[in-house]
Amino acid sequence: MIKALSTFSLTLAAAGMAAGAALAQSGNSYGYHMMDGWSGWFMGPIMMLLVFGLLILGVVLVLRALGIGDTSRNNGNSQDRALEILKERFARGEIDEEEFQNRRKHLRD
């Protein structure tokens, strides 16, 4: 899903740039006079925020797809972390030795 969203945002950005280039080269005055008057004062900043938002969203989605900066993923092996928690519980006296050995055996299987 993340890959699809990042592809979509990059496609949307490329389509926007292509449309802008086509309008600039078309020779009609539509692109130039579109920002005259009050509409330019309101639409300019809104479009700028929209473009920057899409760029930031695209960068975040690409970084998440690569696994960079994602703190929800476990850096080590989840089985190793489970064994560490089991050892901590045994050291605190929450479980006895028999239960510790039994659970450790199940973790290794």
Image: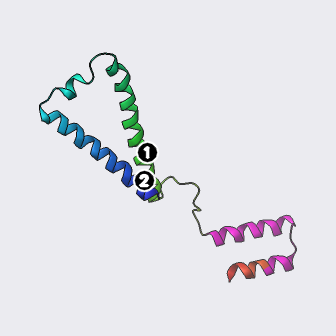
Label annotation for residue 57: 1
How packed mark 1 is, by other alpha carbons closer than 10 Å (few <14, some 14-19, many 20 or more), is: some
Residue 87 in the image, given as x and y percentages of width and height? 76, 69
Nearer to me, 56 or 48: 48
Vertically, is 96 above or below 88? below
How packed mark 2 is, by other alpha carbons closer than 10 Å (few <14, some 14-19, many 20 or more), is: some
Image point 36% across, 25% down: which residue?
Answer: 43
Image point 42% across, 38% down: which residue?
Answer: 53
Would residue 88 be counted in the magenta stretch?
Answer: yes
| Kind of element beneath mark 2 | helix
Per the image, the residue denoted by label 2 is 5
Nearer to me, 63 or 18: 18
The image quadrant that residue 55 belongs to is top left
Q: Is residue 76 left or right of residue 8?
A: right
Tell me if label 1 and label 2 are in contact, CB under 8 Å. yes
Image point 68% across, 83% down: which residue?
Answer: 109
Q: Amino acid at mark 2?
A: Leu
The image quadrant that residue 16 belongs to is top left
Image point 50% across, 52% down: which residue?
Answer: 69
Please report the bounds of the magenta region as a residue range: 78-102
Say which of marks 1 and 2 sits in front. 2
